[in-house]
């Protein structure tokens, strides 16, 4: 990394990466402290994220693409249904 960048830009990029690494967990903790009712969806999302990272390399790409499309279609249906009910 130091070969292609000047000295000042490397340290600036590392600071940005470090801030991103510490900001997300801190924001998550503060958010859960302010809104404790969101703890269940956050736990489910994190479990899905880490579970997906563990199993995704083993799955064929076509299956992953199909699953993403199905989940997107279900999400669109739910959003349209909520909009219809509220209207």
Image (cartoon, grey):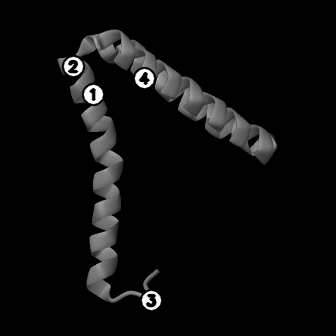
**Residue depicted at x 77% and y 47%:** 61
Number of numbered discs visible in the structure rendering: 4
Q: In this view, which residue lies farthest toward the left?
A: 34
Residue 26: percent from the left, percent from the top? Answer: 26, 36
Residues marked 1 and 2 touching at CB (< 8 Å): yes
Q: Is residue 10 above or below residue 59?
A: below
For label 3, the residue is 4
Choose top left, top right, bottom left or bottom right for residue 24: top left
> Which mark lies nearer to you, 3 or 4?
4
Sequence-wise first label, 1 or 3? 3
Bin the neighbour count of mark 1 within 10 Å (Cα to Cα): few under 14, some 14-19, many 20 and up: some
Residue 11: percent from the left, percent from the top? Answer: 29, 74
Bin the neighbour count of mark 3 within 10 Å (Cα to Cα): few under 14, some 14-19, many 20 and up: few
Q: Secondary structure at mark 1?
A: helix
Sequence-wise first label, 2 or 3? 3
Bin the neighbour count of mark 2 within 10 Å (Cα to Cα): few under 14, some 14-19, many 20 and up: few
For label 2, the residue is 33
For label 4, the residue is 79
- Residue at mark 1 to residue at mark 2: CA–CA distance: 6 Å
Choose top left, top right, bottom left or bottom right for residue 58: top right
**Residue depicted at x 42% and y 18%:** 41
């Amino acid at each position: 990394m130091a070969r292609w960048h000047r000295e000042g830009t490397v340290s600036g990029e590392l600071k940005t990466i470090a801030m991103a690494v510490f900001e997300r967990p801190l924001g998550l903790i503060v958010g859960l402290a302010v809104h404790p009712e969101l703890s269940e969806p956050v736990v489910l999302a994190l479990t899905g994220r880490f579970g997906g990272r563990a199993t995704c390399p083993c799955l064929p790409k076509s299956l992953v693409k199909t699953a993403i499309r199905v989940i997107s279609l279900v999400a669109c249906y739910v959003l349209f249904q909520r909009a219809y009910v509220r209207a």
